[in-house]
Amino acid sequence: MSIDLSQFLPSFLEESDEGLALMESGLLDLEPGDDESINAIFRAAHSIKGGAGTFGFNQVTDFTHLVETLLDEMRDGRREIVGADIEILLKSVDCIRLLIEAEKVGETCEDSRIGHTTDLLNQTLALSDSSNEESNEQASVESTNVGGSSQTSWQIEFIPEHHLVQTGNDPIFLLNALADLGEVSIRCQSQLPAFDELDPEELFLTWQIELIADVDEDEIREIFEWVEDECQLNITKVETVEQVLAEPEHIASENTEAPVPQIEPEPVTAPEASIAPTSAPAASTPATNDKANKPAAKATVKAKPDAGSIRVGVDKVDSLINLVGELVITQSMLSELGNNFDLTKVERLNAGLEQLLQNTKELQESVMRIRMLPISFAFNRFPRLVHDLSLKTGKQVDLVINGEQTELDKTVMEQIGDPLVHLVRNAVDHGIEAGEQRIANGKPAQGTITLDAYHQGGNIVIEISDDGGGINRDAVLNKAIEKGVVEPGVTLTDSQVFDLLFEPGFSTAKQVSDISGRGVGMDVVKRNIQALGGRIQVESEQGQGSTFRVYLPLTLAILDGQLVKVGDQVYVIPLISIVESLQAKAELINTVSGDLVLYRLREDNVPVLPVYQLFNLPADNKDVEGCLLVVVEADGQKVGLMVDDLLAQQQVVIKSLEDNYQQVDGISGATILGDGSVAMIIDIPGIIDMALSHARDKQDQFYQSMTQEHV
């Protein structure tokens, strides 16, 4: 009976991720005397090692065994908890993660960090062994004086539950693990039922095992810990086998090695059906303790595409079940109305359709809630990141996390991780000053970085703030002038100056480090946030600190949109981008160089962009005066979209245009309306870029024509 272990691999990977996260957070907070934390860290490492052994991930098992040994010394009080060892264990967590990732795709991990950290672990454990050498030396001498060393003989009865293999556990891995402890002899027996009652997916074998090894009972039980709830295990200590250290003449007269007791396997009476894949190794050849001579037992696990998974609370599942039940009831009612329908049933039909609409909306909201995860999944990486950066920069930095239970769509969370990492790295490297500088400025030596998340309307807001030196406004503006990004003498608001930080290649760092300062990354941060339909805002006060505020939609699957008509086409404008809609007044319209039309909206001159021109459409109205303007904003820049008509507001399901057709400038996606027609969703940041480019082209054409006339 062959079991496909690959079906259990996703569960192991998910549990391993959780275990590694637990180890990392526990190690960062670990203090001497914290027995509960060190035990939790040890259990996490032990579970990862056991799971890896089940799948035959030998690299993971061997490396984690070293980690487990070091943790075991800490929890037993044989080793003090010191910062140096914690740093080695943190590096080990990274290595285990690398090894698991390599095993997942069936590759051998060649990363140099593995070998380096393995050496550190071995050196640390060797130092521990040498510190106990003196105390062990006398005991060793006394043992020699009495003429020999001893090994214990153990009788082990292993009776697994019939369903054991269905949970991904194969007894052969357990038997091989026993062989690593010492010499084993094995006898396998069957308890097969009648042939017509035989289930090929169940296990009907039991094992009698003799183990000769210098181990205690706990070490044996540890091997079976992974299946302790799915088997009957009896372990009996039989005797002590003396290996006498005699004089040469005594050796010459006696056998040099006593034969290991063998237990011959009893014949198995069974139907002619092969169950060989789950049987034990042949008992006639005792297993050796030399791993080099023993073939490694490794499960055949085929790498499959990672579809991802979400853990969903039972309350959310119950809500879905209830809503589906309501839908079934409504569908039955409408089906009944459809039979022999007449005008007297119109009122009931309308009521049923209204109920169907309500049920569908609630079902949609419930399904969306399933995709929502606490943002702590994204925030959990930052304590370790800040810890490592603090060591690298020599700065004292405290990380405060708030709002970690704020929920965000899984897809958005996966894509926002890297931009947040870059912002936190910048906060440590650029934001927080060195300790002596902070003290000189009347601040505590330890700086503080705060991560916060909260809901605001239909968005989630993530704030990364620090109490560092703030952004030097003049330095940013001067650098922008030096690089030709802005013209000398131009007047900019603080917000506009700070937005210059996101220009490609822009950096005010006086010294480039391996953390930041090369002028790459911040433009990518902004671009990635915009790709998610979000925006970023910067606030800073020199000497007091800075705040980077990221606004993101809760989900990428659905958006609230305003339907507009341009010619014979319907477009969707995201409501989050709309400032206001208005009818243009003639006295507020100005035409400047190059036929660029501006609309005076209170304190702002807003460029007017006729959508029909942008997409080459026929339009009912081509005159700006009296037209409908939808004023939208992105990145602090406003533009008025000239449309023919405003239609309804509604939630729309976003469909990827790139996946189904190709990328189109100014369009972020498409949706299907209630009448079955397709409407394009306007990409507001993209269309503003197009508008500004259009305006620059108009100005260039105007200046060229003026120059030619002058000549």
Image (cartoon, rainbow, N blue to C red):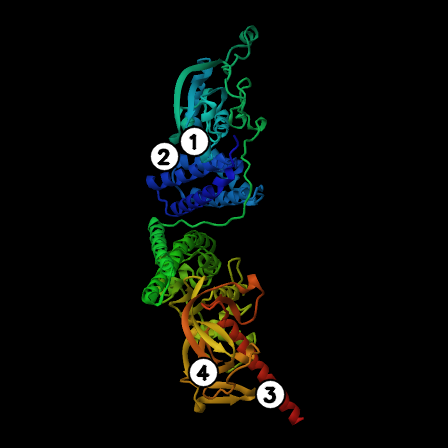
Earlier along the polypeptide chain: callout 4 or callout 1? Answer: 1
Element class at badge 1: loop
Can residue 17 be seen? yes
**Residue 163 — which label?**
1
Query: Disc 2 or disc 3, which is closer to the eye?
Result: 3
Earlier along the polypeptide chain: callout 2 or callout 1? Answer: 2
Earlier along the polypeptide chain: callout 2 or callout 4? Answer: 2
Element class at badge 3: helix
Q: Which residue is mark 4?
A: 628
Earlier along the polypeptide chain: callout 2 or callout 3? Answer: 2
Q: Quadrant of residue 295?
A: top right
Element class at badge 2: loop
Alpha carbon separation for disc pair 4 and 1: 70 Å
Alpha carbon separation for disc pair 3 and 4: 27 Å
**Spot occupied by residue 404 in the image (x, y as percentages of width and height):** 36, 56
Determine crowd level at label 3: few under 14, some 14-19, many 20+ residues with C-alpha closer than 10 A.
Answer: some
Placement of 258 over or under 317, stated as above or below:
above
Alpha carbon separation for disc pair 3 and 1: 82 Å
Q: Which residue is mark 2?
A: 77
The amino acid type found where label 2 is placed reads: Gly
The amino acid type found where label 4 is placed reads: Leu
Left or right: 440, with 598 as reference point: left
Q: Quadrant of residue 454?
A: bottom left
Element class at badge 4: strand
Query: Disc 2 or disc 4, which is closer to the eye?
Result: 4
Q: Which residue is mark 3?
A: 702
Q: Quadrant of the C terminus?
A: bottom right
The amino acid type found where label 1 is placed reads: His
Residue appearing at x 45%, y 82% in the figure: 628
Can residue 124 be seen? no
